[in-house]
Amino acid sequence: MAFEQLSPLKMKKLVALCLPFALLAACSTPSIGDKQADVPPRITIKDDVRTWDKPGAFGPVPSELKTNGQAVCASLNTEKYKFEARGYHARAENIDGKPFAGGGYYCVRSN
């Protein structure tokens, strides 16, 4: 059934039903910032998994670092999941609070 054929009431019900799922999907991958934040992101452990504490602190991956970023994130690939570099921060910190040589990448699943 096309959306044009739905009554206004059915459309409202459909939107009300789908909206929570759309918001959940939008929240599942935190977004990066439009530039690197002054306070760098740090690797932390959450629910026994290493993760970045502030994904929004990453800025876009500079064009000259995209190939390296893709290689770094591809090192996380499994048979089932593939990753890509979505963010970069020049002073990203490891779990001990020491900056990674060459910065850090924010890797997200691409599938």
Image: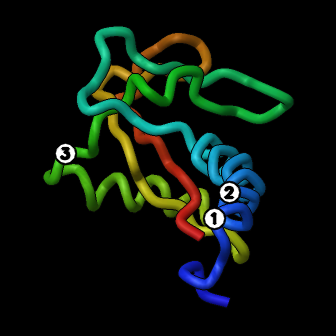
The answer to which of 64 and 36 lies nearer the viewer is 36
The answer to which of 18 and 108 lies nearer the viewer is 18
Q: Amino acid at mark 2?
A: Lys
Q: Position of residue 101 (x, y in %)?
A: 35, 29
Direction from residue 27 to residue 10 in the image, left or right: right
* Residue 43 quadrant: top right
Residue at figure coordinates x 71%, y 61% from the top left: 9
Of circles 2 and 3, which is in front?
2
Direction from residue 60 to residue 20 in the image, left or right: right
Q: Position of residue 35 (x, y in %)?
A: 24, 28
CA gap, disc 1 and disc 3 = 46 Å
CA gap, disc 2 and disc 3 = 42 Å
Of circles 1 and 3, which is in front?
1
Direction from residue 33 to residue 26 in the image, left or right: right
Q: Which mark is residue 28?
A: none
Q: How is the image coloured?
A: rainbow
Q: Position of residue 22 (x, y in %)?
A: 64, 53
Which residue, given by chain and number where applicable, does mark 3 sit on? 62
Residue at figure coordinates x 60%, y 87% from the top left: 2
Direction from residue 90 to residue 73 in the image, left or right: right
Which residue, given by chain and number where applicable, does mark 1 sit on? 8
Which residue, given by chain and number where applicable, does mark 2 sit on? 12
Residue at figure coordinates x 33%, y 20% from the top left: 91
Q: Position of residue 78 (x, y in %)?
A: 68, 69
* Residue 29 quadrant: top right
Q: Please determine whether, in this image, residue 6 is positioned above or below residue 97.
A: below
Question: Are dots 2 and 1 in contact, CB under 8 Å?
Answer: yes
Residue at figure coordinates x 33%, y 37% from the top left: 88
Q: Secondary structure at mark 3?
A: loop
Q: Amino acid at mark 1?
A: Pro
